[in-house]
Image: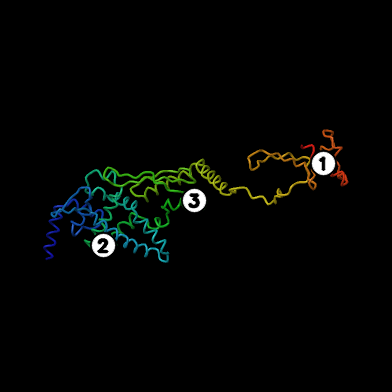
Amino acid sequence: MLNNLIDRIKLSFRKDKELYFSLYQILGFYPHNISYYKMALMHKSIMHRNSKGKPVNNERLEFLGDAVLDAVVGDIVYQHFPGKREGFLTNTRSKLVQRDTLNKLAQEMGVNQLVLSNGHSSSHNSYMGGNAFEALVGAIYLDRGYDACMKFMKQRILAKMINIDKVAYKEVNFKSKLIEWSQKNRVNIEFVLCDQKKDGNGNPMFTFLVTIEGIEGDKGTGYSKKESQQAACKLTLERLRKEPQFIDAVFSAKANRTKMEEEPVENVPDTEVKDDFIISQNTETKEPEKHENVFKEEVFEDRAVKKVNTVETTDSQEEDEFDLSDISAQPKIQSREDIIAAAEAAAFAEE
């Protein structure tokens, strides 16, 4: 049985001799089952199907490799940084397995050159190399097991291509840095989705704009919302560092906003008690007030008129306009005979 296995490997080696050598340069060992690695390098764009009509590509191996890679790198980080807290370990692992890191590794190792595609995706899909790298890790796991994956990452990746200490202490989350800066300076920041479309191969693309205190920063485009926001934040941070007029405009807008927030919405109410319900006794300077009676007729009221009992007197008494000499404050005393005579005279006069 062992001889049969060796014969199949030799036959496959002769058939795919060039692929074997290329994989050896990347992995550091020769594959046992080359079919896993062939599938790992098969992009979905070629639309290849098996004998049953089902599509054959590297997506399933990519899924498996992603999970294995998280476990392997998490194990390595845990052992490399004893005593570090969970947040630090999680952040470091994320940096090592993030899409940009895997894309760069695939490019440097020559994985991109081995990927089978329709020839159009490589220029548009920035994930193709990173996806193929994850699929290769899945192929290693199926072909040789977990220990082989660990050895590959330690000896081929971390020992030769990535400085794990440098990665761990390097801040690459530009969105987090920009948000932290905005919180320290108490400025408002927003992420505005400007455009969402698909490229020539149907891959979704997003464009985000960063605004600070309503002032437009920079736009970033990527194949995910996270990637486009990171790109926009990186460019905006560079402007804040290099363009004094930009940061001046931001803080000027902040000053205007905070000033408006601090100003009272309306005037403070007056505490003076109004006594307009009291009629003033000083009538010398008062003007006649006009009002309407119930018949809608304009009536002028002269406040200079003073009422004493039922007799009205005015300041015009001092003038000679009217003769008031026959007006007496005391009525004349009449006898009974005078009263009867006056009544008879009035009666005869009416006749």
Q: Nearer the viewer, residue 58 or 322?
A: 322
Crowd around label 2: few <14 · some 14–19 · many ≥20 (10 Å): some
Where residue 6 appears, as percent x and y from the top left, is 13, 61
Q: Residue at x 43, y 51 (%)?
A: 175
The total number of labels drawn is 3
Residue with the mark numbered 2: 148
Describe the element under mark 2 as helix, strand or loop.
helix
Task: Please tell me whether residue 92 is drawn above or below residue 351 in the rendered image.
Answer: below
- Kind of residue sitting beneath label 2: Ala
Q: 81 or 123, which is in the foreground?
A: 123
- Residue 201 locus on image (x, y percent): 26, 44
Measured Cα–Cα span from mark 3 to mark 1: 110 Å
Q: Between disc 2 and disc 3, whose residue precedes?
A: 2
User: Within 10 Å of the Cα at label 1, are there few (<14), some (14-19), or many (20+) other Cα atoms?
Assistant: few
Q: Which residue is denoted by mark 1 in the rendering?
A: 344
The residue to which callout 3 is attached is 182
Q: Is residue 292 left or right of residue 39?
A: right
Locate residue 229 relative to residue 61 in the image: left or right: right
